[in-house]
Image (cartoon, rainbow, N blue to C red):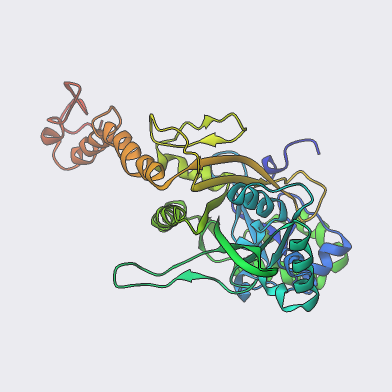
Amino acid sequence: MDEPALQRGKRGNFVGEWFGHRVFPFVRSTAGSILDQQIETCPFLSAAKGAQSMCIKPEKSRGVCTVSTMPTGARRDWIVCPYRALDPGLLSSAISRLFGGLRSGLTFIVPAVRLASADIQIQVLEKLQTEHRVFIYLDEKLGGELSIPRTMSSPEFSFDVTIIEIILLNDLPAVGRFGVLEIQTMDFHGTYGHAVRNLKETLRMFPGDFGATLETHRELLSERIEGPNIANVFKRTFYQMMFKFQLARSDQSAGCVLAIQQSVWDSWKPHLADPVLQPHADGTFNLFKPMQDRPEHVPAWIYIFDLDAASDQSPNPIEIRAIIATDAASFSYYALEAAPEAALQNVSASGGMLTLLARRLWKFWPDLASTILIEGEPAVRLRGKRTRP
């Protein structure tokens, strides 16, 4: 490949992956990918369940895993389905980080839905009896979503993925501590419906030339797809993450991991005062309040990951880019103290809010606009009553 994968392609918003396989900015089309797309298989749910599983998304967004945009000159992928990020490597790393003490080759991880199999039950018991650490995980399609019920003093909160350690108690399997994995996706304005219809029709009419057709007709992947709803995602997620980071302090909890794609993390940085991550000796990073040291037990972790779009493997593998230790108080400090403080400095700065106000008022009352001062100077300079700044 002569250039980084996500630097290619036209400006605009395009379906990036369809049923797990890349269709933009280039197409990975094989017999396996075509079969997944024809029978509408989710390769990620299928891998977790150990059996073929269909995509669970509604018709208008069926099969859309990622959307590719070019918001700042560099093309970015945005994951729009949480199952796209339910990667065995990411899950294993999160479990190791939360529960600790795992030894290579002595860990067994299985979705709760597979416990219905007598063979899996026997396997769990055998693993426990041979000094393995055993973990099950649940989400909406892999055993059922768990939540903490509401009370008169607290709201109900559901978890994306709940991880449970299974321990041996009196020679029988028993439930141990729990941990939480939250997977942050991106919302988009508008609908994918027109692009999904185009993909289905192209596959139906040109199954043998599906990839080549998409390569030469990129517009099929972008019809009426709008941009990411960045501000809404942060506002919707922030309170939930504060709440779950706090719950991670429970003695029954091993902690909470927020898994967030690099593009989403980058879009969140202004909301967190563009924090400087401090390297830790173990290769991870710290995001704590100024002058606060990392505690012995870290209750909350942020995993920044991305897709390896240049890989020949399809679906593209997930790479963990950074692991950050934090807690609710620190996350809150950067969002509710550091970022507003930075914003306040831009009220009276040159080109800031008061400058914008002066320019707006100029249209209606130039003399009034001229009274707004920035560092002792007029925010706009009068060069004649009817001259725009």
Q: For the C terminus, which image quadrant?
A: top left
Q: Which residue lies furthest to the top in this view?
A: 376
Residue 136 percent across, percent down from the top left? 66, 65
- Depth check, front residue: 116 or 353: 116
Q: For the N terminus, which image quadrant?
A: top right
- Depth check, front residue: 198 or 109: 109
Q: Residue at x 53, y 48 (%)?
A: 264
User: 183 left or right of 19?
Assistant: left
Q: Which residue is drawn at 73% across and 71% down?
A: 200
Q: Residue at x 41, y 47 (%)?
A: 328
Total marks drawn? Answer: 0
Residue 52 visible (yes or no): no
User: 358 left or right of 251?
Assistant: left
Residue 283 percent across, percent down from the top left? 62, 32
Q: In this view, does 62 lie above or below 223?
A: below
User: 127 left or right of 233?
Assistant: right
Within the image, what quadrant is residue 82 found in? bottom right
Q: Residue furthest front?
A: 170
Within the image, what quadrant is residue 149 found in? bottom left
